[in-house]
Structures are given as structure tokens and as C-alpha cells.
Image (cartoon, rainbow, N blue to C red):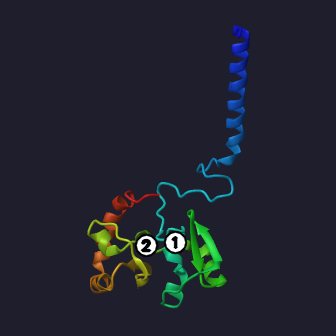
Amino acid sequence: MTTFARRTNRLWLLSRVLIAALAALPMAQASGGTPYGLPSLPAMGDIMALHDSAGIAIDGFDPVAYFASGTAVGGLSQHEAQHNGVVWRFASRANREAFLQTPDAYLPRFGGHDPVGIANGQIVDARPELFLILDDMLLLFRTEQGREVVRNNPALVGKADQKWPEMALQLAR
């Protein structure tokens, strides 16, 4: 094989690699590198209230229902919305709309993790059916005992507030 033929083969191979690489560019979104059509990933500062392996926040419970009815109500797949790259479910269209208008009012404090664990320097997953509304904050707990501790000593939430910014950085995004 001549030098000219080898160079031609190398150029042909290089051109095919470049064409394939350029063709793949539209597959990634500039905002997060996720494949086209999928939601963008949360930013580094966003805290995900994610407990379910299916990617549904607070195990599919309706965050608005805690405030509206004072109970933990499961959301429905026909009333889903995305916020900060996470899927949230709601029991009704009205709850979904209320959440979309002011999501920060309904998001669980500490990314949905147990405030007792956070106050003690540990990230502890909570059970969404164990909750407490305290000073217009939705708090989720791992155990009934933890909920009673906070109910009897609300200052513990202040301790968790102080530790949360550093602890939130430990969470996988």
C-alpha cells in the first residue's frame, strides 16, 4: 500500500469519526447534557426530595394535600408535574395548579429528609405518611418518635436548619 493510499484511508476514517461525533451533538441539551426529550437534571444547588427509585418525589404523596386536608394523600399519575427535575404527583388538578403557582410553599423541608436525623448530623430518609406542619413548613419523619420529639421541642428544627446547608452537599444529585 502506498503512502498516498494510507493517508487517504486515515482521512476517510477520521472523517467518519467526526461525522458520527457531530451527529450525536443534538442528542444532548446544553442545559444539562441529558438526552433530548428528557427533563434537565437539577442544578448543583437544588435539593431533590426523592425517595422512590422511579424518580417520583416523596413516594408519590401529594405535597399540597398535607396543607389542604391535613392528611398524607397519595397522588395520581394523571396529575403529575415536574419541578427542579423531579416528578411530583397530586391528588387533584387543583392541587397540581396550586403547587405550580407557589412550589416553595409546599416543598418538604430538608429535601424530605427527617429533621431529627439532620439535627444529629445524619441524612435519614423519611416516611411521607409521618409528617408535621410546623410554622407553615412540611416536615417528614422516619419514625413516630421523631415526630413527637419535634412536636415537643420545635427548636430542634432550628438546629437542623443550621446543619442542613452543609449536609445537603452530601446528597447525590
Residue at mark 2 to residue at mark 1: CA–CA distance: 9 Å
For residue 86, which quarter of the picture? Answer: bottom right
Residue 41, label in figure: none
Residue at position x 49%, y 86% from top? 72
130 vs 52: above or below: below
In the displayed structure, 21 sits above or below 54; it is above
Residue 152, compared with residue 105, is above or below; it is below
Asked whether the beta carbons under mark 2 and mark 1 sit within 8 Å of each other, the answer is yes
Identify which residue, 61 or 135, lies in the foreground. 61
Label 1 crowd bin: few (<14), some (14–19), many (20+), radius 10 Å: many
- Asked if one can make out residue 106 in the rendered structure from this viewpoint, the answer is no
61 over 81 or under it: above or below: below
Instruction: Describe the element under mark 1 as helix, strand or loop.
Output: loop
Left or right position of 148 against 101: left
Mark 2: amino acid = Gly
Circle 1 residue: 57
Name the one closer to the observer, 43 or 154: 43
Residue at left offset 34%, top offset 74%: 115
Q: Which mark is residue 112?
A: 2
Residue 106 percent coordinates (x, y):
51, 77
Q: Which x, y percent locates residue 82?
A: 61, 68
**Quadrant of the image for the N terminus?**
top right
Instruction: Specify the amino acid type for callout 1.
Output: Ala
